[in-house]
Amino acid sequence: MRDDPPPLARTPNTNAARLGFGVSGPHGLALTSRKSTFSILEKAVEEGVTHFDTAPFYGDGEAERRLGLFLHASRVEAVVSTKAGEPLGRPFWGGAPTAKDFSPETIRRSVDDSRRRLQLDRIDVLYLHGPAAIQIDEALPALEALVGAGAIGKWGVCGRGPEIDAALARGAGAIMAPYSILDRSRAPLFAAARENGIETAAIEPLIRGFFTESHEAVRRPADLWGRARAFRAPPPPVAPEEMRRRLGVLNDAGPAQVALAFALANRRLDTVYFTTTKAKHLAENLGSADIELDDEAVRQLNDLFPETT
């Protein structure tokens, strides 16, 4: 069977305009076939998804290659972001890199390699992945030169802590950080960024799949990636079963849909990213765009779930 993506005629759906798809994790590994990735991307575009995020360290560039092949063959207009920050080493158990290289030379090479794999003349947003403030300072001349040359549209930072503050103080054009019904701690940062015209992107709104009843099941190779990622992460303050029960009290939609709708209810978020390898979960997640949570529903959800900091 062919591994090339099919030609695609895109049908716009504005309801999904703020939902973005992450071509990450299993989409860069042999656990998920290229054909499966292309099929998921095709369905996402058909439902109106136009924002795609990836990174060179997913499968040593394979995730970027897949996204590039798909976009080139389908000829859809998309907003594409990727990342820079070359890992210098990983613990033997396969956790997060022990250090990253944000030197100007490495960033320029990383952008050139990403553009080639993505088959793009320009990357819309380049995120530095978890840099320290001093590393942003080191990278800044190269980032500004890349913007000036048209190789990237803007630069930003993807992170969880003080690196976001450092990025905002240094003129970043975009920030990306976790935001979910259990972790709303970065809401003030997102609000401040939007007030200053800075693009905002939320990741991990589904908390590593805990809102799906099958999140612990391993029914096919691609599920191994999610289980390994969840195993390395700290447990949520509310058990998955309890999270799903609480989410069911407000709406007859699925728990994952309500969790995504909660993130979308924060209008300071330009894009809310999720990922999946399953067509069923893709359809459910995209259905969250049709759920409107009013202020009272958001208040009830805030009361139902403890906020982590």
Image (tube, rainbow, N blue to C red):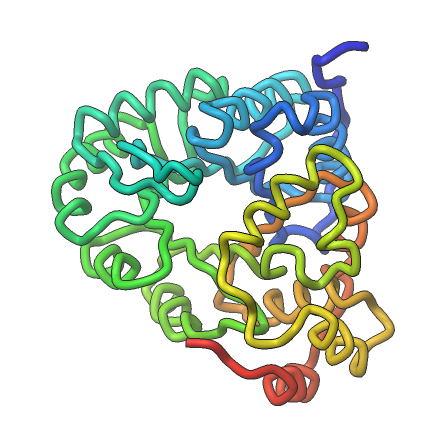
Residue furthest to the front:
92
Q: Is residue 38 above or below residue 73?
A: below
Residue at (32% x, 27% y) in the render: 150
85 or 267, which is in the foreground? 85
Q: Is residue 150 left or right of residue 2?
A: left
**Looking at the image, which residue is at 31% across and 49% down?**
130
Give x and y (percent) for residue 116. Answer: 43, 16
Q: Is residue 202 left or right of residue 101?
A: right
Q: Residue 35, how many percent across, how many down?
A: 74, 21
- Quadrant in the picture for the N terminus: top right
- Residue 77 in the image, given as x and y percentages of width and height: 60, 31
Above or below: residue 3 compared with residue 196: above
In-image side of 110 versus 44 (left or right) = left
Q: Residue at x 37, y 19 (%)?
A: 113
**Residue furthest out toward the top:** 1
* Residue 67 in the figure: left or right of residue 150: right
Based on the displayed image, in which of its 4 quarters is residue 241 positioned? bottom right
Expressed as whole percent of the image width and height from the top left, the position of residue 68 reads: 55, 22
